[in-house]
Image: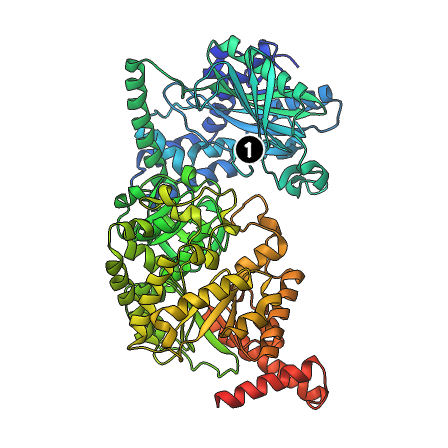
Amino acid sequence: MGDGNDLIRWIGTLGRDDVAEVGGKGANLGEMMRADLPVPPGFVITVEAFRRFRDAGDLGREIDERLERLDVDDPGRLRDAAEELRELIRRAPVPDEVRAAIRDAYGELSRRAGVHEALVAVRSSATVEDTARFSFAGMFESFLNVRGAADLVDRVKDCWASAFGARVLFYRKRQEVGGGMGIGVIVQRMIAAEQAGVLFTVDPATGDPGRIVIEAARGLGEVVVGGLVTPDRYVVDREHRSVERTPGRQEFMVVYDEAAGRNKRVPVPEEEAAAPVLTDAQALRLAELGERVEAHYGAPQDVEWAIERGAVFLVQTRPVTTLEEKPAEAAERAEARERAEARERAEARARPEGELLLRGQGASPGTASGPARILAAPEEGDRLKEGEILVATRTAPDWVPVMRRAAAIVTDTGGMTSHAAIVSRELGVPCVVGTRNATHVLHDGEVITVNGRDGTIAAGAVTAPERAAAAPERAARAGEAPAPAAAAPVTATRLYVNLAEPGRVEDIARLPVDGVGLLRAEFMILSALGGRHPRLLLERGAGDEFVDRMAADLTRFARAFHPRPVLYRTMDFRSNEFRGLEGGDRFEPEEANPMIGYRGAFRYTREPDLFALELKVIERVRRDYDNLHLMIPFVRTGWEFRECRRLIDESGLGRDRRLELWVMAEVPSIAAWLDDYVAHGVAGVSIGSNDLTQLVLGVDRDSEAVAPLYDERDRAVLAAIRTIIAECRRLGIGSSICGQAPSVYPEYAEFLVRCGIDSISVNPDAVDAARRNIARAEQRLVLEAARAGAHREGPKGQAFRSVRERRDRRS
């Protein structure tokens, strides 16, 4: 088929002067193909085809009338108008001559590919898209894996309809783009990419023209462009033709499923996961193609590429614009950047309310809406106003003062046991972690809705039902008394609560709980330190100030829960967290893996003066409230604990015979040392399932690279917990658990009850569900034992007697 028809243009005949006829992307692809660069074959359905479709019947007149009365500043009306316009286009018939031209061109492309019906990609190509003045980045639609002439025509109409999306209409109005904006549609043979990615013909971070940077991943390239994986990174030295590789992390890839007719995610085979995505020869081949593209356009380029059966294809190129400039050029660029940011904010406001923007892991339940505030460091915290949503790459203890003001929290990294997740649950604010690129996708000041239960971030404010659902949580945060709840079932297994933040203690104390199973010290200590490292505090003679402030906070907890027990876990900062405080770089070591480094009981043996401050705080509070007890974290060996015991005995607490001393069971060695701990006065053990899981499975819970391996339900972890509880029962001391697992997994309660645990401590939001799960597990256990014959020996009979004895004691 030739090019005599003004409705179809083959890519090989196009060039940069054909933008008005086929749109920016189509013209650019033709320019690359004419330069003998490897571009997938295909054709462009011209702007003229869209004009004939638009002018057929009354469609054009109706579109113009609706655009004339469009109010883009009303998000609801804009959304409705956009959807009506798109639906008009989807319903409108395609003129016979346009449909025939598309069908004939598709048949020709299939014949050239040697197949009956070629699999194609269908991409929008607007005349004002990717131009020097307008970007319209990501606003027009593309469709992959299209097969058959009828399906192709439908997807072409969808591309035409995308010119009337809410964001496009808002952008057109704000940028004063006239009604004559045309849109072409590119149709290219689908490349079944085995590897794909992007390359920059200049280092985008440094502007070094001697370095070509390539990012590569397995499967289709959307995982790289969309930031879904960490790609392999290759740097090619132009002068020496050498290749330097930085491995990435890719747990899955996207491939085309022929049977299902769509793309799907599949795990990267284990044997491939650690292997380089590209060979050095492939990296050098890509670098050579990048140099050719740059030479043709006369400027550094950002190129998207794909490899199919060893053949390299270039699917898009654009100029790199983040290079070093002369002062005048830099000033001009800064102004342009400001305008672009303003446009981004405008585009963000135009996102239809409820549009899904991001998905991550729901880490703290609840729903909240407000302006996003993207912060790079806690020092920027004064930018976050009450009611705004904190968006950050990650958080650490020095972020806590900022987090207290947030309506919700969103992070790029992290999981259910990350700092952001734990603190959010303590504060009672919704949180979504592990979004990967929230700090890039969201715009400062953009109103968003965070759903901390299902892990989604949507555009605009929440709907009325969601607001109603979130009302009890907002009331609790505002200090209002929670609404009366149904009577909680009585259980033999005590239910405790995990706490750290004094702001909500009075409200939480009214919940049906038996005490505090874990009172974390870190957040109160940070407040008492005032951003300073504790050793700096001692140097400046401010130890008494620290004791006064800590005692005031601890008194609130002890008073609110009295006479119910409150287990205070002493400071368990890691060295990397301490380094962020003022003076921290003077006192803290730099550790490759601080999770298993200088922390817990071992730190107390090396810095007894700091431990003494905390002991002084507890002594002062216990003068009025003897329900406050002491728990030592991260105990590895017997000699560490004995040294801590000696320090306690030498303090004012040494004469306090009613003080209960507990240890955290976070290190698997506790099973071997527990009899020694008991001999030196331990009254109970609280299982920290987060750290215990980490050390049983050898998985750093702060590492995203091995996150799929982290599972508190792994049978090795369950076996360790079962052993610890059994040892506690044998030695006649209390057993509890305060890790994240019981708050997340309902089945964990039954497992713990069957093991004979004395108490379970959960997050405040999980209290009601945990109480029901415990009661259900106990009832099931009693019923099973009754059916089997309670007199029989064996695990069920023993567990039944344990439940019965504890219930009798509580009665």
Amino acid under label 1?
Val
**Residue in the picture at 33% in, 60% down:** 524
Disc 1, SS? helix
Seen from the viewer's position, the closer of residues 267 and 136 is 267
The relative height of residue 253 versus residue 605 in the rendered view (above or below) is above
Horizontal side of residue 106 vs 391, given as left or right: right
Instruction: Check disc 1 and report the residue beneath it.
Output: 224
Seen from the viewer's position, the closer of residues 597 and 343 is 597
**Residue in the picture at 40% in, 55% down:** 607
Picture quarter with the N terminus: top right
Q: How many C-alpha atoms fall within 10 Å of the one at disc 1: few (<14), some, or many (≥20)? A: many
Can residue 272 be seen here? The reply is yes
Q: Position of residue 203 (x, y in %)?
A: 48, 20
Seen from the viewer's position, the closer of residues 94 and 801 is 801
Q: Position of residue 540 (x, y in %)?
A: 24, 50
The relative height of residue 539 versus residue 685 in the rendered view (above or below) is above
